[in-house]
């Protein structure tokens, strides 16, 4: 789904509500809490400011394309917990969240929230497969931190990308904000091609990093040995919503990516007929996992390769390993951090029932988290590390169905 208007950091699936004003009386600010990663390794994180000097930005004339990315990696030792969202992003995001949650601005402490990534922590020596994560349209890269940290704790280097000018606010070094800047209509295909170019550029910069260069535009210090742990022979991609489309689109044009996951993204989006989308028309000869929900397909029904035309055509045209999973009681944002944040908020105030219904549905949050922690790492373990996961694909966990 690509939707220009964003609120609560997401697209039009969320019920719009009036945005509360800072003058509204605010009770004690609610801190955010996230489940600890379950893997054996500590998780380190750092960020990169990347400038593509050879590419004009498609959204703002006269600018070169620039990106902010975060690198999450297996770490050793200790470090300061990194912010969940950069301050400027958190402030803009918090205003939208206040309206959607029907709470005053400041009721939730987005600015002070911390992730389980340790800022600039020493790297754990070794070689780790690389996975690129692309968020949904309008969603900051930090909003998938729970699953990203999980993969890093399991021995992956995960690189998350903000697609500049799609997101409500991307913060660059020095506190500069790039706010959402899109035309009123006709942006879908430009967004798709831009995202593919973004991810391919990121892969190019990771190659430079692995070769001993610092690709950060300001040449800021990076964790010692970060480039040495990148196993660029084994690269995966996954994403939520538009990010799932991006994972498939990148695989269609770049053989460096050996396995991909689409979390509830309609692959034909932006084309008058799904078969017109090159990704759908070509399918893939590499492993790919489709993961939908019970209420985000055509007409509000299930999203799977039987119901969604673009998924069906992609499925039929693909020759690689493939699976189709589903959360029947979940909804579009069950795949990102809303799945743990909304139940947390319910401890402190009443979350609008329609917001719950439109974001995470009625699925058991703990069961959904357990399924995500099972299937996403298992997929990459099998196809990037060549570690068979026969037991994982034999029986569905609670809240999950296998679509055959």
Image (spheres, rainbow, N blue to C red):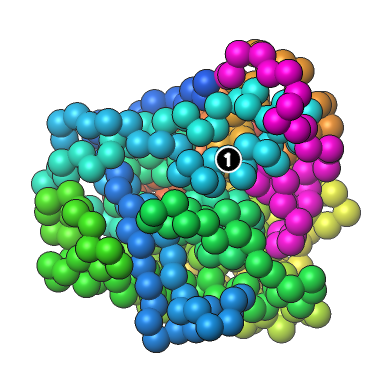
Residue found 41% across the figure and 36% down from its top: 83
Quarter of the figure with the N terminus: bottom right
Residue found 56% across the figure and 37% down from its top: 337
For disc 1, the marked residue is 91
Boundaries of the magenta span: 1-30
Q: Is residue 73 above or below residue 304?
A: above
Please provide percent x and percent y for residue 272: 80, 80
Q: Main secondary structure of the magenta part?
A: loop
Q: Residues within 10 Å of mark 1 (few under 14, many from 20)?
A: some
Q: Secondary structure at mark 1?
A: helix
Q: Is residue 49 above or below residue 279?
A: above
Please provide percent x and percent y for residue 334: 63, 39
Please provide percent x and percent y for residue 275: 72, 80
Magenta span contains residue 332: no
Instruction: Determine the residue located farthest toward the bottom in the rendered image.
Output: 54
Q: Is residue 285 above or below residue 302?
A: below
Residue found 69% across the figure and 69% down from its top: 182
In the rendered structure, the answer to whether residue 168 lies left or right of residue 379 reads right
Please provide percent x and percent y for residue 23: 73, 27
Specify whether residue 118 is in view.
Answer: yes
Specify whether residue 193 is in view.
Answer: no
Residue found 36% across the figure and 31% down from its top: 116
- Within the image, what quadrant is residue 358 found in? top right
- Within the image, what quadrant is residue 29 found in? top right
- Most foreground residue, 393 or 93: 93
In the rendered structure, the answer to whether residue 40 lies left or right of residue 297 reads left
- Most foreground residue, 243 or 303: 243
- Within the image, what quadrant is residue 27 found in? top right
């Amino acid at each position: 789904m690509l939707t220009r208007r964003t609120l609560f950091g997401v697209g039009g699936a969320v019920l719009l509500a009036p945005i509360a004003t800072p003058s509204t009386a605010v009770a004690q600010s609610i801190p955010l809490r996230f489940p600890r990663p379950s893997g054996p390794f500590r998780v380190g994180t750092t960020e990169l400011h990347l400038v593509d000097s050879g590419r004009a930005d498609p959204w703002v004339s006269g600018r070169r394309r620039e990106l902010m990315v975060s690198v999450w990696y297996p770490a050793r030792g200790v470090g300061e917990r990194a912010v969940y969202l950069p301050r400027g992003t958190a402030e803009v995001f918090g205003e939208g969240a206040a309206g959607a949650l029907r709470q005053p601005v400041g009721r939730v402490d987005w600015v002070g929230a911390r992730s389980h990534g340790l800022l600039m922590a020493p790297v754990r020596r070794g070689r780790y497969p690389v996975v690129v994560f692309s968020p949904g349209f309008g969603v900051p890269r930090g909003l998938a931190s729970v699953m990203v940290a999980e993969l890093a704790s399991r021995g992956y280097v995960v690189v998350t990308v903000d697609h500049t000018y799609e997101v409500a606010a991307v913060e660059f070094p020095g506190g500069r904000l790039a706010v959402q800047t899109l035309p009123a209509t006709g942006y879908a295909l430009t967004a798709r091609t831009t995202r593919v170019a973004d991810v391919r550029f990121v892969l190019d910069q990771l190659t430079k990093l692995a070769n001993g260069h610092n690709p950060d535009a300001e040449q800021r210090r990076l964790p010692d040995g970060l480039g040495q742990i990148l196993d660029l022979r084994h690269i995966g991609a996954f994403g939520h919503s538009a990010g799932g489309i991006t994972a498939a689109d990148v695989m269609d044009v770049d053989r460096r990516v050996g396995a991909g996951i689409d979390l509830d993204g309609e692959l034909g989006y932006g084309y008058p007929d799904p078969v017109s989308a090159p990704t759908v028309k070509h399918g893939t000869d590499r492993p790919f996992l489709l993961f939908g929900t019970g209420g985000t397909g055509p007409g509000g029904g299930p999203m799977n390769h039987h119901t969604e035309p673009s998924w069906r055509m992609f499925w039929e045209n693909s020759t690689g390993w493939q699976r189709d999973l589903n959360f029947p009681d979940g909804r579009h944002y069950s795949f990102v951090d809303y799945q743990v944040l909304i139940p947390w908020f319910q401890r402190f105030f009443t979350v609008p029932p329609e917001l719950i219904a439109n974001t995470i549905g009625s699925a058991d949050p703990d069961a959904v988290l357990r399924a995500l922690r099972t299937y996403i790492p298992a997929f990459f373990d099998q196809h990037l590390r060549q570690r068979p996961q026969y037991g994982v694909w034999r029986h569905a966990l609670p809240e999950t169905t296998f679509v055959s």
